Image (cartoon, rainbow, N blue to C red):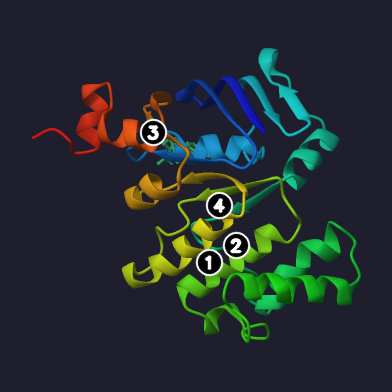
Amino acid sequence: MIEIRNLHKSFGSLQVLKGIDLSLEKGKVLVIIGPSGSGKTTLLRCLNLLETPDAGSLKLGSTEIGFDGGRKPGKQQTLKLRQSTGMVFQSYNLFPHKTAIENVMEAQIVVQKKGKEEARKRSAALLAKVGLSGKEDVYPHQLSGGQQQRVGIARALATDPDVMLFDEPTSALDPELVGEVLKVMKQLAAEGMTMVVVTHEMKFAAEAADTVVLMDDGVILEQGPPEQVLKHPSSERAAQFLNLLT
Ligand code: ADP
């Protein structure tokens, strides 16, 4: 489903991604961990072209884009890639003046050109799926952070993406609200959704990931099954980050 080859990205003179290679099969969950500033979010944002890589290539589903020689993706390619991904942000990014169900309906109407009733029906089903039946007509500020993030997940699912991208989805939440969001994510994973998740939740990584990638300073330091990466990393730097050294 995803293949990334030798991906590079700089912001000015700051090299943030220094040659990233990874691949992910359909239905699998990839969890990206690593110290703050290591390039995790930038990598995730490159996957749906919220950031344009400087070099390397990216394949997502049937869309393949090369960036070598400063090549930029075309409008159609960008649109296609965006439509095959659903993104969940740390800060939810819901429309404050739209109700929960209107937030979920929006892209179906604007992007997919669905009729209002069809979009409403699908959105109600998605809100039920994330445990928010009965909250259709409330506004984001009337919901807890955990509930808002679950609306964010329903919204990202609404356009039937091939891959769901999560950017630290629980980092802004009070600790007691983290569990309800992770539960929805685990349920999605169990249903076979292909997912890339940037997170600091090591328990989630251990339980839900098929592959864990540990990034440091723009490169992949470790990559493998959670048991291997989290418990038996091969480098001292990784062990340090994971607090495995005494
Ligand atoms: P992480 O998600 O691992 O914390 P990020 O990908 O957010 O890391 O950031 C990696 C580095 O790139 C940081 O030093 C950050 O300040 C820098 N960075 C990220 N986005 C931008 C941007 N749009 N412009 C300039 N620098 C950026």
Residue labelled with disc 1: 149
**Mark with earlier residue (4, 3):** 3
CA gap, disc 4 to disc 2? 13 Å
Q: Quarter of the picture for ligand 1?
A: top left
- Residue 183, horizontal then vertical, whole percent: 47, 64
Circles 1 and 2: CB distance less than 8 Å?
Answer: yes
**Mark with earlier residue (4, 1):** 1
- Is 43 positioned to the left or the right of 231 in the image? right
Q: Which mark is residue 38?
A: 3
Residue at 73% in and 19% down: 71
- Farthest left residue? 246
- Residue 46, horizontal then vertical, whole percent: 60, 35
Front residue of 117/53: it is 117
Residue labelled with disc 4: 189
Element marked by disc 1: helix
CA gap, disc 3 to disc 1? 24 Å
Does residue 72 appear in this view? no
CA gap, disc 4 to disc 3? 25 Å
Residue labelled with disc 2: 153
Element marked by disc 3: loop
Residue at 77% in and 47% down: 83
- Is 179 positioned to the left or the right of 50 in the image? left
Element marked by disc 4: helix
